Amino acid sequence: MSLDRAELEDDIRGACTRSDYAAAASVALKAYGPEIYGFLVGILRRDEDASEVFSTFTERMWRGLPRFAWECSFRTWAYTIARNAARTYDAETRRRGRKESPLPDGSELSGLAEKIRSATKSYLKTQTKSRIAKLRESLPQADQMLLALRVDRQLSFQDLALVMHDGEAELTAVEVTREASRLRKRFQAVKAKLLELGKREGLLDKDGQRDRSKPG
């Protein structure tokens, strides 16, 4: 989409103001769907799991639009929904079956979500996973999420505080600042751990630079 992010957010908000939530969801999915799905694939690793969680994300996003208060960007809110859906997705959830009411079969939004899944899945399969990227998969899922959201998606630490928040009550401004500071420190610790793993595997030299003599 050619619109910059500020214009995109305005378009989504404008559709919500008109109570045209189908249009808002469609614009949001076209713009943010591929990166959300890519994030889920990176965290969950299995296409089947990522597809299931992406469906859950789409449903929760669509149904939550009328209640979204715009206290953060839509993109931040979308990642919050995706992260929470991924965090609660496990074998027990799969055995119980879907908890959300599915989108109507053949609906425009359902079809769009499927197109995004298929296109993004095909793109991801063409990308060669580096050995350093594989090292990230050895980290706990919470640390992988932190790296993915900060490094790959470039969320601010204030936005990360909202996305990574586990409590039901919304954070106050003071709590967001405090949590952002904690996540900044955690991010530095995770980077240091990944750096040490890279050195141990011989992928990085003693100065932390990539060893060009090593593939990937």
Image (cartoon, rainbow, N blue to C red):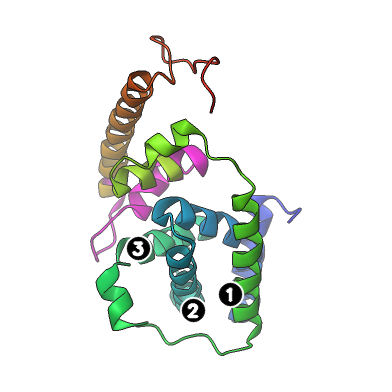
- Whether residue 72 is visible to the viewer of this picture, yes or no, is no
| Residue that appears at 44% across and 40% down | 150
Observer-side mark, 1 or 3, equals 3
Q: Are marks 2 and 1 in contact (CB under 8 Å)?
A: yes
Distance in Å between CA atoms under marks 1 and 3 = 23 Å
Tag 2: amino acid: Pro
Q: Nearer the viewer, residue 148 or 176?
A: 148
| Residue that appears at 53% across and 28% down | 216
| Residue that appears at 53% across and 40% down | 129
Read off the residue under disc 1. 16
- Whether residue 121 is visible to the viewer of this picture, yes or no, is yes
Q: Which residues are magenta?
A: 149-174
Read off the residue under disc 2. 66
| Residue that appears at 24% across and 64% down | 169
Q: Earlier in the sequence, mark 1 or mark 3?
A: 1
Distance in Å between CA atoms under marks 3 and 2 = 19 Å
Q: Residues within 10 Å of mark 3 (few under 14, many from 20)?
A: some
Q: Earlier in the sequence, mark 3 or mark 2?
A: 2
Tag 3: amino acid: Asn
User: Which type of secondary structure does the marked residue at label 3 adopt?
Assistant: helix
Read off the residue under disc 3. 84
Q: Earlier in the sequence, mark 2 or mark 1?
A: 1
Q: Residue 145: where, in percent of width, then height? A: 38, 47
| 56 is higher (above) or lower (below) than 101 | above
